Image (spheres, helix red, strand yellow):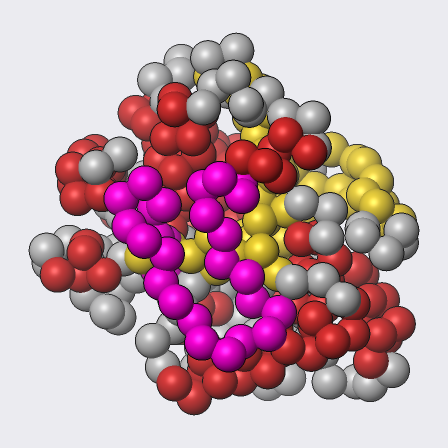
Amino acid sequence: MKIILPWTHNLLRRYGIDGYKKISLDKILQISEENGGKLNFTFARQIAPFNIETILALLYIKGIIDKYSDKVGEVNLHILQWGDDKFSLGNIEKRIFVELQTLDDKEYYIAVQSKKQLKKNIKIRDVYLDVDKIREMIKGTGLEYMRKSLDYLIKKEKVTKIKEREESKDAVNILDFWGLTTLYYIGEVSRDIFGINNYEINEFKDEIELANKDQYKISGYELTFEYKGKKLRFRTYDASHIYEKENEEYKKEEKMNSYITLALYSGIGYILLEEDSGKSSVDQKIREFYKEAKDKTGYDILILEADEKKLIERGIISEDSYVEFIGKDKIEKIINTIKETYGI
């Protein structure tokens, strides 16, 4: 993933791509003013954003508030999950959430289902995680914020019995666990980034109206805290029903283009935190999705691109380890390194 910070970098040029619109800091502030001081972002990850990109995004948000406090009154980040997408062990960005790896080379397989079962045609929402394996993973990594999400699900009676190889195991849904874990991670690293002492996490139910006036009920988990008198709200929820309905409305085809929905979010001022894979074949496919989304909806997808190149150059992460989890002993060091590296 690559996040380009506007006050330290010129935005990279992307030639001849229709529907993909990188935006400057001035444009971000203009959008905020047009929305009554609200600054809105989205992450589009099938399961959850990764540790590194989450830290970069939080530092970026903090930088905007610090420099332009008079122009920003509220910050919202919607983390869109996609439970109806197919799970794949061959895709590292999905596999990492059942076969967790840390930057210090620790590895844990935490799914209830065997790898053989997960290689079948299974939706993400049908993947379950073994509670005992999660506890073992937490003990091995020292990442206590993960225990908080597990305890939350136990308290809310969202643990279910899954039969595997004639044995019944306590399990939690992959979207619930990693959605909550992402929010607890945001809350914990925000202690260092924003200097907060407290945050709240609760379930929420709400409605959202997209740029084409389609309305949807949304529900999931929400984290809130205040920084310099500004309310920050982070929501994570399964947006499958939105992806599918908008794809059907604009394409009338089975082949899914989730960027259609993201264009409609951008149409109401949401800025997508997106990555550049660095692989020409993947980028070409994404460019086609962007163009189709613009052609179908009439809206550009507003992009804030995150740049991890400097972290790779400094040896903090490798090109293949951007999805890995940051062990407890490395979080503070990486936050400080990012601040130093990007001047934020």
Front position in the image: 254 or 111:
254
Viewer-proximal residue among 261 and 293: 293
Q: Is residue 281 above or below residue 29?
A: below
Image quadrant in which the N terminus is located: bottom left
Residue 133, visible in the rendered structure: no
On screen, residue 191 above or below 266? above
Task: Locate residue 338, reporting x and y percent.
Answer: 22, 42
Q: Position of residue 32 (x, y in %)?
A: 61, 33
Magenta residues: mostly which secondary structure? loop
Magenta region: 1-28
When asked about the image quadrant of residue 118, the answer is bottom right
Residue at 58% x, 56% y: name it. 302
- Is residue 8 within the magenta segment? yes
Residue 228 visible at all: yes
In the shown orientation, is residue 70 left or right of residue 12? Answer: right
Outermost residue toward the left in this view? 314
Query: In x, y percent, where is residue 192?
Result: 30, 25
Q: Residue at x 67, y 53 (%)?
A: 266
Picture quarter with the C terminus: top left
Between residue 212 and residue 151, name the one nearer to us: 212
Name the foreground residue: 103 vs 155: 103
Identify which residue is drawn at 26% across, 70% down. Answer: 320
How many discs appear?
0
Indicate whether 253 appears above or below 51: below
For the point 51% across and 79% down, the residue is 16
3 in the magenta segment:
yes
